[in-house]
Every structure is written in C-alpha cells, then in structure tokens.
Amino acid sequence: MSGTHAILVENWAGEIWAMAYFRNLSGWQIALFGGVFLLHLVETAYSVWWGVGDILIRTVPATHAYYRDSWVDLVLGTSLAQDSIYFLATAILTVSFAGLVMRKAWAFWAYVAASLLFNIDWILTGLAGNDQQPEAGYFSLAYAGVLSLLLWLTNRVGICR
C-alpha cells in the first residue's frame, strides 16, 4: 500500500468510527457531550495530578522542594485514612470518565459518588483545621454541581445509555 493510500484508508476508518460513535445524535447533543467530556477530563486529570503529587510528597522527601510549602503541609497534615477517601474518589472519578467515554448512563452515578467522597474529604480537612484555601473547595463544589447537572442531561436526552 502506498503512503497516500494508507493515509486515505486511515482517515476513512476514523470517519467511520466518528459516524458510528455519534450516530443518531444531533449537533447540539454532540456539542453537549463534547463540553461534558472536556469538563470531566479536566477534573479527572486534576485529581490524578493531585494524587500523584500526594504520593510523591509522602514517599520521596526530596520532592518537597518542588511543591509549594502550603501543599506539602496540607499533604503531610492529612491522615492516611483521609487520603484513602481521596484516592477512592479519584479512582471512582476515573471510572466515571471511562463510563462517559463509553457513553454509559452509570457514569453519572459514579460521578456523584466520587463528588460525595471529595466533599467528605474537604469537610474532614476543614474540621482538622488543615484547609488553608476554602475557596478551592467552594469552587470544586460548584464545578461538581454543574458537571453533575450536565451528566444528568446527557442521560435525559439519550446521549448516554
């Protein structure tokens, strides 16, 4: 197969996949799904990034110089039991994102469970007096509310099944 022919076949296969993935969806449904996808991707990547940083701070003291002092204090001031809530929430959030990519209705419920666990983690941090940035928690709460509503809408309008 020539190089040009291979590119054409590859592009054709990509177009077939996109047509099958978005079959029976209108333009506004595709736009809604794209927005939900991007918002969910950002939150999932952010949570995984925090989780990796948490593990590095706890296990490799030499990495403390690369993080803000407030972040190091927050991580080291949090119990492992509370951290396990965060890691469980991150794992469920990642599963929810995978469900969204597969366009499954249960992605909404997994997201709600992850959001609940993240909020429990935030409340426990505040009760321990270790929350130096409560604004971030309020933003996260609002973000979760908006994304929950949008995920619910993807179920209601038939994007996810």
Image (cartoon, rainbow, N blue to C red):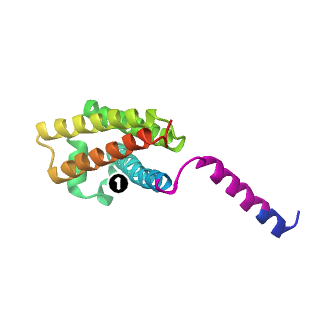
Residue 67 in the image: x percent, y percent?
Answer: 29, 57
Residue 36 in the image: x percent, y percent?
Answer: 41, 50
User: Which residue type carries mark 1?
Assistant: Thr
Farthest residue in the right direction? 1
In this rendering, the count of numbered labels is 1
Farthest residue in the top direction? 81
User: Residue 21: within the magenta?
Assistant: yes
Is 98 placed left or right of 10 in the picture? Answer: left
Residue 74 in the image: x percent, y percent?
Answer: 21, 47
Q: Please, what secondary structure does the residue beneath circle 1 have?
A: helix
What residue appears at the point 15 percent right and 50 percent down from the top-left corner? 134
The N terminus - image quarter: bottom right
- Crowding around mark 1 (Cα neighbors within 10 Å: few <14, some 14 to 19, many 20+) is few
Farthest residue in the bottom direction? 4
In the figure, 16 relative to 154: above or below? below
What residue appears at the point 78 percent right and 64 percent down from the top-left corner? 8
User: Residue 135: within the magenta?
Assistant: no
Q: Which residues are magenta?
A: 9-28
Is 27 placed left or right of 122 in the picture? Answer: right
What residue appears at the point 35 percent right and 54 percent down from the top-left corner? 63
Q: Residue 155 sits in which quadrant?
A: top left
Is 158 placed left or right of 71 in the picture? Answer: right
Is 55 placed left or right of 120 in the picture? Answer: right
Q: Nearer the viewer, residue 124 or 27?
A: 27
In the figure, 111 relative to 61: above or below? above
Which residue does the numbered mark 1 point to in the structure image?
63
Residue 73 in the image: x percent, y percent?
Answer: 20, 48
Q: Nearer the viewer, residue 122 or 109?
A: 109
Question: Dominant secondary structure of the magenta stretch?
Answer: helix
Q: Nearer the viewer, residue 63 or 53?
A: 53
What residue appears at the point 46 percent right and 37 percent down from the top-left corner? 95
